[in-house]
Image (cartoon, rainbow, N blue to C red):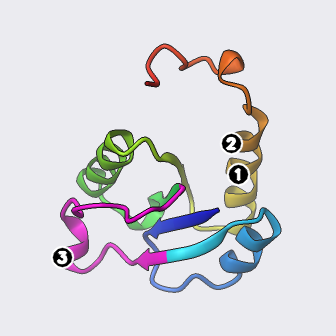
Amino acid sequence: MNAYLVGADVLGNIPQVLAQHGISVQKHVSGRNVAHQRKPPSLNGADLLILFTDFLSHNVMKAYRELANEENVRFVACRRSVCALSQSLEKLNEVRDCTECPKRKKCR
């Protein structure tokens, strides 16, 4: 699974945590650069969008969430810490069948 990461200047141990969940970093943008603050044209085949909320403005998060919804890419929003990311990924993996998902009517 490939992940598109938005936020954080330095990833630190995050790539190792993602690797434990079978996820590789496809692309990482810090979100500080003006070009990163605009809605990108595409997520380029990413399977998962990860937003680090403590480094992003609301408008940047909104633009990336909308793009993920348009391209049917799952997304996770969490703080940039190993613990917060691990918890978010575990919650994401808990719902594997769409029939169990509380948002199944909004999906698709």
Measured along the vertical axis of the image, is residue 79 above or below residue 71? below
| Percent coordinates x, y for residue 106 in the rendering | 44, 19
Which SS class for mark 1? helix
Q: Amino acid at mark 2?
A: Leu
Kindly report the distance in space between the C-alpha atoms of the residues bearing marks 1 and 2.
5 Å
Q: Name the quadrant containing residue 43.
A: bottom left
Residue 1 magenta-highlighted: no
Which SS class for mark 2? helix
Q: Residues within 10 Å of mark 3 (few under 14, many from 20)?
A: few
Q: Amino acid at mark 1?
A: Leu
Measured along the vertical axis of the image, is residue 23 above or below residue 72? below
Helix, strand or loop: magenta stretch: loop
Which SS class for mark 3? helix
Count of labels in the image: 3
| Percent coordinates x, y for residue 100 in the rendering | 71, 18
Which quadrant, please, contains the C terminus?
top left
Q: Amino acid at mark 3?
A: Ala
In the rendered image, the residue lying farthest to the front is 45
Q: Which residue is mark 1?
A: 89
Q: Which mark is residue 92?
A: 2
Q: Which of the two discs, 3 and 2, labels the residue nearer the N terminus?
A: 3
Callout 3 touching callout 2 (CB < 8 Å) = no
Which quadrant, please, contains the N terminus?
bottom right
Q: Which residues are magenta?
A: 27-47
Callout 1 touching callout 2 (CB < 8 Å) = yes
Q: Which mark is residue 35?
A: 3
